[in-house]
Image: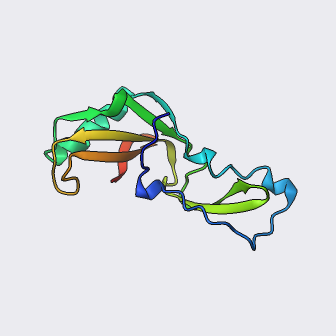
Amino acid sequence: MHKRRLSITLALAVVAATSLSISTSSASAIPDCFKIRAFAAKPIQSDVKSAITKYFQSKNQLPISIAKNQEQVIDVSLWSVGAHQCSLGGGSFGKYTGTIPKGATAAVQVNVTHKPGVGAPNGASLLVLAKFAGKGWSVISSS
């Protein structure tokens, strides 16, 4: 998988938690800190591409190009808004902050190149989009 910097909003803040006390039975449900950052890549969906095009059209930053014509699928349950715990292995735990809004049924991350503009003078953006029932896809962050 191609490794790129993640959006600040999805950055994993792994902090060793030496004072955490978690029972062995609950530790099995805690995700691996390193695996939660590995988003599966798949071909971009047409409705995701349409939402991205509308987003950049509203900013007068067309044309766009989507890296490898792919989106990276974000696990909504792992990245929901709020603080979460994860396992660093060997009995150590970390924490991270999720940013996918409540009510989202799906989320993806997409690397896009576009006409330079305010907020992205180099013409490159990492977008996070969330899908909401009855509303479709919306850009929730751009970096």
Q: Would residue 40 be found to the left or right of residue 17 on screen?
A: left
**How many callouts does the rendering have?**
0
Percent x, y of residue 51: 30, 38
Q: Is residue 23 left or right of residue 3?
A: right
Side of 71 relative to 32 (left or right): left
Q: Residue at x 17, y 56 (%)?
A: 118
The x and y percentages for residue 14 are 59, 61
Residue 22: image quadrant is bottom right
Task: Please say if 73 is above or below 19.
Answer: above
Residue at the right extreme?
24
Of the pair 53 and 34, the residue shown nearer to us: 34
Going by the picture, which residue comes out furthest to the bottom? 19
Q: Nearer the viewer, residue 42 or 139?
A: 42
127 left or right, relative to 41 = left
Q: Indicate whether 17 appears above or below 89.
A: below
Tell me residue 58's x, y (percent).
18, 46
- Tell me which colouring the rendered structure shows: rainbow
Residue at 86 percent across and 57 percent down: it is: 24
Residue 136 visible here: no
Determine the residue positioned at 36% across, 34% down.
48
Q: Quadrant of residue 88?
A: bottom right
Visible residue check, residue 137: yes
